Image: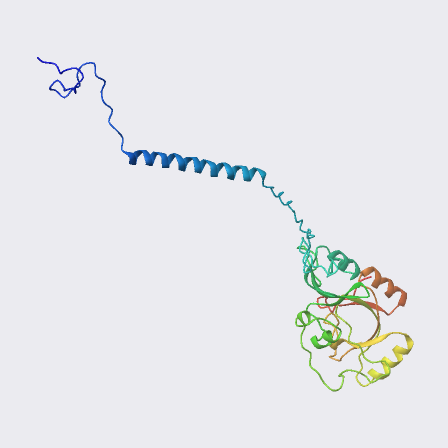
């Protein structure tokens, strides 16, 4: 096998390998690849410079202080109660004072019954009822009461002999006056005897009266009643069939009855005291819608 001459070129061994002892040749890279690599390195350096600049700028930039947090405190709203009623359901006035207190009405209006209940409260007027246990006399159980000068008084019981129009003229609200009957009207006051003291139509509110004299003779009514009024100064007179159903409307002969009387209180003790003070033949009666007209008040 021949070897290449020294100092001249070389040849492979026929297998494409360099002769033994000759280092392998390194292939040359394309100039384009080198240019792209340099460009990438330059871009990375530039990007790093920009980022570094931005970071340095942020560090030296003054930071605005955070705005103080303001807390708005809403004014508290006091707890109020509607003017129609309090927490217990008792009607109240706009000033917050109980308008129709059952205990006040019971005491001031002389309703000597327990368990007074207010059905309607309309300012200075109220509709009240009482509970009567079984076995006790019923009497009047429902009343219309009114407040005058700060004190309650009974206006009438239900049913009533008071006309609705008359009650409204006294200031009663229509919501309560509609509970009363409409009374017939006439130009002349029927039953009045034409005396200087006019005939009265007292309220049927449970008040007691002291009957001082009774006239039952037709044709002599005016003379007898005028004389009795003079005998008992300050007294009044009524016609029983035009007053309360607790009074006997006619005598045993069918004649109408005129009575001279004085008002008393709402209790038996008050009424009997006034009867004893007047002396015989005076006697007591109740002005209401339930008492027996044939029975006198026993004292």
Query: Which quarter of the rendered picture does the N terminus lie within?
Result: top left
Residue closest to the eye, 86 or 245 = 86
Residue closest to the eye, 184 or 26 = 26
Q: Residue at x 91, y 76 (%)?
A: 231
Q: Residue at x 68, y 69 (%)?
A: 176
Expressed as whole percent of the image width and height from the top left, the position of residue 14 reads 11, 19
Q: Is residue 149 left or right of residue 80?
A: right
Query: Which quarter of the rendered picture does the C terminus lie within?
Result: bottom right
Q: How is the image coloured?
A: rainbow
Q: Residue at x 41, y 35 (%)?
A: 44
Expressed as whole percent of the image width and height from the top left, the position of residue 296 reads 78, 66
Q: Residue at x 75, y 56 (%)?
A: 103
Q: Is residue 91 left or right of residue 195?
A: left
Expressed as whole percent of the image width and height from the top left, the position of residue 10 reads 16, 19
Residue closest to the eye, 291 or 147 = 147
Mark count: 0
Extreme front residue here?
A: 7
Q: Quadrant of residue 238?
A: bottom right
Q: Is residue 20 above or below residue 112?
A: above
Q: Quadrant of residue 273?
A: bottom right
């Amino acid at each position: 096998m021949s070897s290449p001459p020294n100092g001249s070129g070389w040849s492979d061994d026929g297998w494409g390998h360099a002769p033994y002892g000759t280092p392998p040749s390194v292939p040359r890279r394309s100039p384009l690849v080198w240019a792209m690599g340099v460009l990438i390195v330059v871009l990375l350096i530039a990007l790093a410079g920009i980022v570094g600049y931005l970071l340095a700028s942020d560090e030296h930039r003054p930071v605005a202080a955070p705005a103080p947090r303001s807390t708005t405190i809403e004014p508290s709203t006091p707890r109020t109660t509607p003017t129609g009623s309090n927490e217990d359901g008792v009607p109240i006035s706009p000033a917050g004072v109980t308008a129709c207190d059952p205990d006040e009405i019971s005491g001031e209006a002389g309703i000597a019954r327990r368990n007074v209940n207010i059905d309607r409260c309309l300012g200075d007027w109220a509709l009240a009822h009482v509970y009567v246990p079984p076995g006790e006399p019923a009497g009047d159980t429902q009343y219309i009461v009114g407040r005058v000068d700060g004190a309650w008084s009974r206006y009438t019981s239900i049913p009533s002999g008071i006309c609705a129009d008359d009650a409204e003229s006294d200031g009663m609200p229509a919501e309560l006056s509609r509970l009363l009957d409409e009374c017939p009207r006439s130009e002349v006051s029927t039953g009045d005897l034409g005396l200087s003291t006019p005939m009265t139509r007292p309220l049927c509110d449970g008040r007691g009266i002291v009957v001082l004299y009774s006239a039952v003779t037709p044709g002599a009514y005016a003379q007898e009643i005028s004389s009795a009024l003079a005998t008992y100064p300050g007294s009044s007179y009524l016609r029983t069939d035009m007053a309360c159903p607790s009074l006997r409307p006619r005598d045993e002969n069918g004649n109408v009855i005129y009575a001279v009387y004085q008002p008393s209180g709402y209790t038996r003790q008050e009424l009997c005291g006034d009867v004893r003070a007047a002396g015989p033949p005076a006697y007591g009666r109740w002005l209401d819608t339930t008492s027996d007209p044939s029975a006198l008040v026993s004292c």
